[in-house]
Image: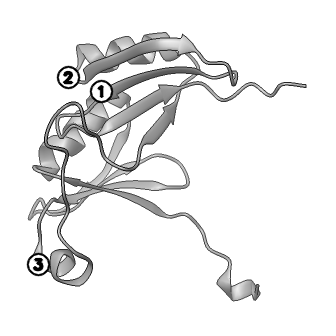
Amino acid sequence: MASNLKPAFAYTVFYVKDVAKSVAFYAKAFGFSVHRLDESHRWGELESGGTTIAFTPLHQHETDDLTGVVHTPRSSQERQPVEVCFVYPDVDAAYKWAVENGAVAVSEPELKEWGQKVGYVRDPDGIVVRMGSHVNQTK
């Protein structure tokens, strides 16, 4: 591949009901710093290292007309076809903090067979967030 075609993963965009509320929720529940929230509240960003976590409204003509309408799960028995994972040195403490600050508990952290401690919560829009450790490399 040509050197000018090497991608960098720059953004993960969440389509949400209320951008300002989601930005505030993720900052408080998961510990991110707010990078920006535009005056129209149609775009918000959190600082998360090399990749920006961004928020935009569920429906807007700029994207609905070009790429299709966003569909959300109809019940708690359904979820988005994508999941994000935030890594913490102390998964139990981070999970407890997130739930105390508005995240909906799905599954408490437990050690998985692949060597990662993982717990799951939902945000106010029903998006599943995996809270985990780095995967321990097995030898």
Q: Please tell me whether mark 3 sits on a helix, a strand or a loop.
A: helix
- The residue located at (27%, 29%) in the rendering is 28
Label 3 neighbour load within 10 Å: few <14, some 14-19, many 20+: few
Q: Please tell me whether mark 1 sits on a helix, a strand or a loop.
A: helix
Query: What's the mark number on residue 61?
Result: 3
Q: Please tell me whether mark 2 sits on a helix, a strand or a loop.
A: loop
Identify residue for label 1. 29
Identify residue for label 2. 102
Where residue 139 sits in the image (x, y, percent)? Answer: 91, 25
Query: First in sequence: mark 2 or mark 3?
Result: 3
Amino acid residing under circle 2: Gly
Q: CA distance from mark 1 to mark 3?
A: 30 Å
- The residue located at (25%, 38%) in the rendering is 78
1 vs 3, front mark: 3
Where residue 77 sits in the image (x, y, percent)? Answer: 23, 31
Direction from residue 52 to residue 63 in the image, left or right? left
Above or below for 26 versus 115: below
Above or below for 119 versus 39: above
